[in-house]
Image (cartoon, rainbow, N blue to C red):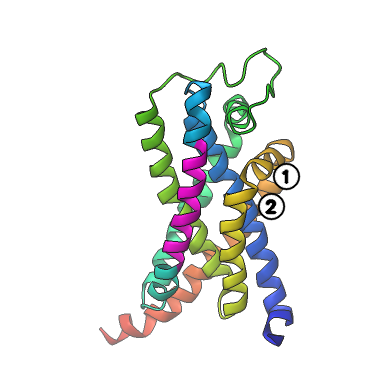
Amino acid sequence: MTDFFSPEAMTALMQVIMIDLVLAGDNAIVIGLAAAGLPKEQRRNAIVVGIIAAAVLRIGFAAATTQLLQIVGLLFAGGLLLLWVCWKMWRELRQNHAQEAQAIEALSESDVDYDGVVAGKAPRKTLAQATWQIIIADVSMSLDNVLAVAGAAREHPNVLIFGLVLSVALMGIAANLIANLLQKHRWIAYVGLVVILYVAGDMIYRGALELLPHVGGA
């Protein structure tokens, strides 16, 4: 337990909390955007299913990823995947904020842009289309979240466990609040992006060190 309060563990903990906040909010916005084009009576059900699925997937990926990262080469591959996550987040942060407003409206059932209708500008879609988009987003973003938390926690299992529990909790009970916070205060998302970029670089570096003896032996 004392390891949890060491300087290295506290640094890792701060990184994990920021990663969880940013990626939970990002995941929620994607879910809200997918559901925004549905009628009101279907929208809430799609969002609830999406958030529950994201929480369950995080638990499942956590059980597998923490073991898989012990395999030589997968830490390096995970770092490369997080680099792609950073690029995707960077593009999303620079895109039109009107889409995010529609997602927030769908999540909160409130008229954020004061146009007299909730998520009225979102393209219409069927429940099947929205559900498929949500499932794909949940799988991808849950894996991203678990990889980033595992990479940031490094050799601190207590921090890793805390980060994964926090990730599930945020998606389960605070996804809407976090998404709203990130939409109003963009700088938080940019700080999170820098943290994830650092974690990705660290994973690539440590993964390369793991690979060097095997490459040299070949």
Count of number-bearing discs:
2
| Left or right placement of residue 35 versus residue 97 in this view | left
- For residue 196, say whether it is visible: no
Dividing the picture into quarters, in which one does residue 19 lie?
A: bottom right
* Chain part drawn in magenta: 47-62
Where is residue 178 shown, x and y percent of the image? Answer: 67, 45
Q: Is residue 148 magenta?
A: no
Dividing the picture into quarters, in which one does residue 104 lie?
A: top right
Amino acid found under the numbered disc labelled 1: Trp
Q: Residues within 10 Å of mark 2 (few under 14, many from 20)?
A: some
| Left or right placement of residue 177 versus residue 33 in this view | right
At horizontal 35% and vertical 30% (from top left) the residue drawn is: 128
Where is residue 215 shown, x and y percent of the image? Answer: 31, 80
CB under 8 Å between callouts 1 and 2? Answer: yes
At horizontal 42% and vertical 62% (from top left) the residue drawn is: 60
| Left or right placement of residue 181 versus residue 107 in this view | right
Q: Residues within 10 Å of mark 1 (few under 14, many from 20)?
A: few
Q: Is residue 55 magenta?
A: yes
The residue that label 1 is drawn on is: 187
Magenta stretch: helix, strand or loop mostly: helix
Along the line of sight, the residue nearer the viewer: 119 or 191: 119
Indicate which disc residue 191 carries.
2
Q: Which quarter shows the N terminus? A: bottom right
User: For numbered disc 1, what is the local secondary structure?
Assistant: helix
Amino acid found under the numbered disc labelled 2: Val
Indicate which disc residue 176 carries.
none
User: For numbered disc 2, what is the local secondary structure?
Assistant: helix
Q: Which quarter shows the C terminus? A: bottom left
Where is residue 136 shown, x and y percent of the image? Answer: 38, 43
